């Protein structure tokens, strides 16, 4: 059954002054009268309702871990007076930055010009993409944890009222038979914005020295394949690569060395 057809049947059966949701067993909205809410977590749309369902035991919170996440490195704030105490250090830092930017520009331009003529458009795209990537924050591997909410199947139907200050928000929850879906009907006239949203934001896990060592020891080593498959008889090697057209340039290889030596020579 297509989702659009299910929506039409759903709204035909529930055409009244109520807010109706169909959510899955993890709290994500599948059907809503407002299309921008579909696919979102219920706690991001109605924090009061999700908070009440959690307190009633309809949903339980489970902590999940992501051991292959990427996080921003911690910011190290230095004293603002440091450049005033050591102006030579500030000048050296600025010179290094300018030389590094020039070096990256030359390397990218050299690589772009050395590609084949018919790959020019692709090389230009890579060139602009690399500049965009440089402007983004540098990320580092980390472990994160985030909450996941699971419906407790023992509670198939419930109802209640949420105290929202000057009004009460009435709701009814019913599990849809032979599925993992839940039907939620709420009163839209009561404003419950005093309740915070329930989010599924990931937070970085901070380890101390001993726990970090145990964490590294507990990681299982990846098993290598028993055999090597470096070639396939149906593969056409001419369709791959293109790196054979690239050639190393001695001046470009020496530029990184000059980038570090030149600033020191200028400040002597």
Image (cartoon, helix red, strand yellow):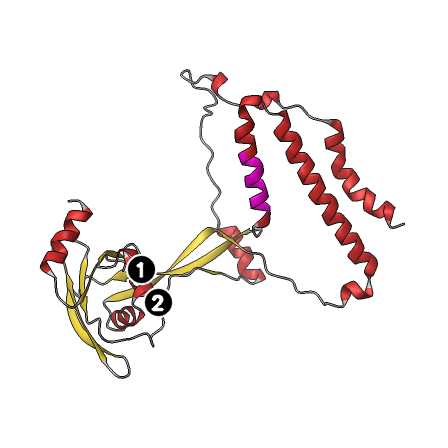
Tag 2 residue: 198
Residue found 31% across the figure and 69% down from its top: 47
Foreground residue among 139 and 205 = 139
Residue at the image position 75 percent from the left and 36 percent from the top: 255
Instruction: Tell whether 13 sits left or right of 59.
Output: left
Q: Is residue 17 above or below residue 10?
A: below
Instruction: Give how far across and how far down residue 147 sits, in percent.
Output: 37, 62
Secondary structure of the residue carrying tag 2 is loop
Left or right: residue 202 versus residue 43 is right
78 or 230: nearer the viewer = 78
Q: Tell me the crowding category of disc 2: few under 14, some 14 to 19, or many 20 or more residues within 10 angstroms, Cα based.
A: some
Give the magenta-colored segment's residue range.
125-134
56 over 26 or under it: above or below: below
Q: Residue furthest left?
A: 13
> For the N terminus, which image quadrant?
top left
84 vs 123: above or below? below
- Which residue is tagged 1? 41
Q: Does label 2 or label 1 sit earlier along the sequence? A: 1
Residue 92, which numbered label? none
Can you name the residue that lies furthest to the bottom here?
166
Category of crowding for the residue at label 1, using alpha-carbon neighbours closer than 10 angstroms: few (below 14), some (14–19), many (at least 20): many
Q: Quadrant of residue 195?
A: bottom left
Label 2 – label 1 distance at C-alpha:
9 Å
Q: Principal SS element in the magenta part?
A: helix
- Considering only vertical position in the picture, is 177 above or below 114? below
Spot occupied by residue 18 in the image (x, y as percentages of width and height) = 17, 68
Q: Tell me, yes or no, whether the highlighted magenta stretch contains residue 235.
A: no
Quadrant of res 59 = bottom left
Number of numbered tags placed on the structure image:
2
Q: Position of residue 80 (x, y in %)?
A: 72, 67
């Amino acid at each position: 059954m297509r989702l659009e057809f299910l929506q039409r049947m759903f709204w035909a059966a529930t055409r009244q002054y109520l807010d109706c949701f169909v959510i899955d067993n993890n709290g994500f909205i599948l059907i809503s009268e407002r299309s921008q809410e579909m696919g979102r977590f219920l706690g991001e749309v109605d924090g009061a309702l999700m908070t009440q369902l959690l307190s009633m035991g309809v949903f339980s919170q489970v902590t999940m871990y992501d051991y292959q996440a990427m996080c921003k490195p911690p910011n190290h704030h230095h004293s603002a007076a440091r450049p005033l105490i050591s102006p030579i250090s500030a000048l050296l830092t600025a010179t290094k930055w300018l030389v590094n930017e020039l070096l990256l520009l030359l390397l990218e331009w050299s690589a772009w010009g050395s590609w084949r003529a018919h790959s020019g458009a692709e090389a230009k795209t890579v060139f602009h993409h690399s500049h965009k990537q440089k402007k983004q924050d540098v990320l580092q591997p980390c472990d994160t944890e985030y909450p996941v909410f699971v419906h407790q199947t023992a509670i198939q139907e419930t109802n209640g009222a949420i105290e929202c200050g000057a009004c009460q928000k009435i709701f009814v929850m019913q599990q849809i038979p032979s599925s993992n879906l839940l039907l939620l009907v709420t009163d839209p006239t009561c404003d419950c914005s005093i309740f915070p949203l329930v989010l599924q934001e990931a937070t970085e896990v901070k380890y101390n020295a001993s726990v970090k060592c145990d964490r590294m020891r507990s990681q299982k080593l990846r098993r290598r394949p028993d055999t090597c498959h470096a070639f396939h008889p149906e593969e056409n090697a001419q369709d791959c690569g293109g790196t054979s057209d690239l050639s190393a340039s001695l001046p470009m290889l020496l530029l990184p060395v000059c980038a570090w030596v030149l600033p020191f020579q200028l400040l002597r």
